[in-house]
Image (cartoon, rainbow, N blue to C red):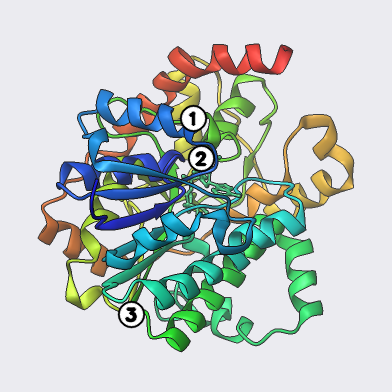
Amino acid sequence: MKKLDDFVTGGTGFIGRWLVLELTQKGRSVGVLARNKMTTGVELLNWIDRHGGDSKRIYLIEGDMRKPELGMSTQDQEKLKGIFDVYNLASMTGWGLRYDDAYQVNVEAPLELIKMIAERAKKVRRFIHITGYKAGKGRHTPDSLGFEKQRDWGKYRWAWYMFNKGIYHGTKIKAHYAVQRACQDYKIPLTIINPAALIGDSKNGEISLSQSDGLLSLIDQLYTGKLMAIPGRKDDWLPLVPVDYLAAFIANISAQKESLGQAYFVIDERTPPLRNVIQEIAHSLELKPPRFHLPIWLMKLCLRAGLSKFLGISHEGLGYITGIRYNVDDEKALAEHFGITRDDIMVVLRKTVKYYTDNLLKSKRTLCTE
Ligand SMILES: NC(=O)c1ccc[n+]([C@@H]2O[C@H](COP(=O)([O-])OP(=O)(O)OC[C@H]3O[C@@H](n4cnc5c(N)ncnc54)[C@H](OP(=O)(O)O)[C@@H]3O)[C@@H](O)[C@H]2O)c1
């Protein structure tokens, strides 16, 4: 492959592979950073071909976000020269992460990548950074969230925030601001994507085991009878979005001039309150759902007081359940413009539960007992 159009970090992950699939289907040649070309890299190529993409358009680049210059060889760094779009999805995800590693991958590495792009990729059209819906831009959310104020927090306030909310969430928020600042300093055109919690693809509900601390944890808790109450209030929700819809949105964004300097929530606002989502999952599993609600603060307290070890559930996930409704008008208008359609979110949820129980649960159990 002579020239690369795009560079993707996290391309071997759940969202990343659907994005790489979209990009190859658009005829782009894509450089994908892979920690291990021979295992996850080759697995990605096979997956892309099985899903109707073109693996010949992918160039695997060996690297590691924990290393200087992302562990990329000088020869591979040269390949960045003609790049147009850069998609940063690599991340340590999940609960109970080690601070040093997570900070390196989630905060330091994107800054290193921006610097490398500024020095080498003179034709860069867009740096697209993927974070989460809890790191949304202030203009879309009530002021009480105070995101703009967090920007100038000192070391100790950040440490307290991360202790409280968890390392994953804390590092993602920190990166949200650090990336904005770095792109400003290096004059790199930036777009931020703030997705909801991911569910499987619209067609088959295909989901990956890397989502074990996300939606799959909710399914597991119901399955094992550990979810005895519904977290939060009656109208609280966990916003959801199907992975293929998100990937299609991301793959189209850089061609849109107006998206420059913008942040987009990619959320299906039709997601019902969490209690209905739990009912739906329980129904699919032919189980009885819990009926009573428990306040989030009380659940967090119990989990932090020791119940977490006993139940195998982390308090960190509870922070994603919210009463806030996000403004997704911009996203919906753009998706319509791109011609991306949205299936009924509850139908996709049902397919996801089925995909998980039919295809993944057994292998997960085997992994746990090995
Ligand atoms: N999933 C969600 O519900 C959700 C919701 C909102 C936002 N997001 C954000 O979306 C992005 C992608 O999430 P995901 O669910 O697709 O994550 P994922 O499935 O866990 O994939 C993470 C990706 O990051 C790569 N990675 C991790 N550490 C690395 C390192 N040291 N060097 C190089 N690559 C490394 C992984 O590579 P390996 O294959 O080598 O492990 C993998 O490709 C993340 O930024 C996440 O915060 C996710």
Residue topped by disc 1 = 38
Which residue occupies the foreground of this view, 187 or 163? 187
> Residue at image x 24%, y 45%?
1
Which quarter of the rendered picture does the C terminus lie within?
top right
> Residue at image x 48%, y 61%?
131
The mark nearer the N terminus, 3 or 1, is: 1
Q: Where does residue 76 sit, x and y in percent of width and height?
A: 42, 55
The answer to whether 284 is drawn above or below residue 31 in the figure is above
Label 1 CA crowd tier, 10 Å (few <14, some 14–19, many 20+) = few
Label 2 CA crowd tier, 10 Å (few <14, some 14–19, many 20+) = many
Q: Where does residue 253 sit, x and y in percent of width and height?
A: 24, 63
Check disc 3 and give the amino acid type. Answer: Gly
Residue topped by disc 3 = 261
Cα distance between the residues tagged 3 and 2: 36 Å
Residue topped by disc 2 = 275
Which mark, by number, is residue 113? none
> Residue at image x 43%, y 56%?
75
Which residue occupies the foreground of this view, 257 or 123? 123
Of the two numbered discs 3 and 1 in the rendering, the one whose residue sits closer to the viewer: 1
The mark nearer the N terminus, 3 or 2, is: 3
The mark nearer the N terminus, 2 or 1, is: 1
Cα distance between the residues tagged 2 and 1: 43 Å
Q: Is residue 22 left or right of residue 113?
A: left
Of the two numbered discs 3 and 2 in the rendering, the one whose residue sits closer to the viewer: 3
Q: Find residue 207 and report its image quarter.
A: top left
Q: Find residue 212 and report its image quarter.
A: top right
Q: Is residue 321 visible?
A: no
Cα distance between the residues tagged 3 and 1: 37 Å
